[in-house]
């Protein structure tokens, strides 16, 4: 099984690169942002609670996203592997993911981080907001709040994987194909 964490701040290009990896390696894409937006569209209680936080750029509680990932791992036991996108976003989520994967006798091979600085992220997200329909992409203050949440709560997750010798950072600014080629070379080394 090939299990990757694609890491980086909002707007770093995780979704774009995930799509390419899925096509090449037949992996299942687990994006907690997408799973939460599906709950919102379905009008579930979980979705309604999560929306209040997401509309403020705040992370939803660890237990909520860990539960969603647990369900997906159990639904896809025969998968070739997973790409985790937007998860884990806190050190507690990372520790929980290690435990969940251990229950299936698998583990994360590598965290690949896309590094992009804040001004570029803000511009990308504002421009995505014009077409994505995502309310959290349409307001500059909200985007800055998301980047701040990332810096405070999510950036430390990189150290968690670095301590396991599983972290590689790459420059997330440049041609999509060039960035993808770097990701593939990291994957192929594992
Ligand atoms: P982005 O494009 O900013 O990376 P996502 O689509 O991954 O955002 O997530 C959108 C919002 O959903 C986040 O700002 C956060 O409120 C919530 N969210 C997504 N994943 C998680 C997670 N793993 N833990 C907590 N909150 C999450």
Image (spheres, rainbow, N blue to C red):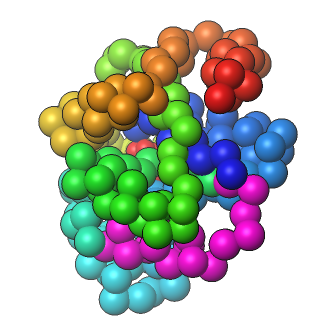
User: Could you tell me residue 30's position as x and y percent?
Assistant: 57, 58
Residue beneath the point at 33% across and 50% down: 94
Is 136 placed left or right of 111 in the picture? left
User: Could you tell me residue 141's position as x and y percent?
Assistant: 22, 38
Q: Residue lying furthest front in this view?
A: 105
> In the picture, which quadrant includes the C terminus?
top right
Residue beneath the point at 19% across and 42% down: 153
Residue beneath the point at 29% across and 36% down: 160
In the image, is residue 159 above or below residue 134? Answer: above
Q: Does residue 144 appear anywhere in the picture? A: no
Residue beneath the point at 56% across and 73% down: 72
Kindly report the secondary structure that dominates the magenta region of the rendered protein: helix
Snapshot quadrant of residue 46: bottom left
Labels in figure, total: 0
Q: Nearer the viewer, residue 20 or 88?
A: 88
Magenta-tinted stretch: 64-81
Judge whether residue 122 is colored magenta. Answer: no
Q: Nearer the viewer, residue 46 or 132?
A: 46
Q: Does residue 21 appear anywhere in the picture? A: yes
User: Could you tell me residue 111's position as x and y percent?
Assistant: 48, 34
In the image, is residue 8 above or below residue 78? Answer: above
Q: Residue lying furthest left in this view?
A: 152
In the image, is residue 30 above or below residue 120? Answer: below
């Amino acid at each position: 099984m090939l299990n990757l964490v694609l890491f980086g701040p909002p707007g770093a290009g995780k979704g774009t690169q995930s799509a390419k990896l899925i096509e090449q390696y037949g992996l299942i894409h687990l994006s907690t942002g997408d799973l939460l937006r599906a709950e919102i569209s379905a009008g579930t209680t979980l979705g309604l609670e999560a929306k209040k936080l997401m509309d403020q750029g705040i992370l939803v509680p660890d237990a909520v996203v860990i539960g969603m990932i647990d369900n997906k791992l159990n639904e896809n036991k025969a998968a070739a592997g997973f790409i985790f996108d937007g998860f884990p976003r806190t050190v507690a989520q990372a520790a929980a993911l290690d435990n969940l994967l251990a229950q299936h006798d698998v583990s994360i091979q590598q965290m690949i981080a896309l590094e992009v600085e804040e001004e570029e992220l803000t511009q990308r997200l504002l421009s995505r907001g014009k077409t994505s329909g995502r309310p959290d992409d349409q307001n500059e203050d909200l985007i800055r709040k998301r980047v701040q949440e990332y810096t405070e709560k999510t950036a430390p997750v990189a150290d968690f994987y670095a301590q396991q010798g599983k972290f590689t950072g790459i420059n997330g600014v440049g041609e999509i194909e060039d960035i993808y080629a770097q990701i593939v070379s990291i994957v192929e080394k594992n």
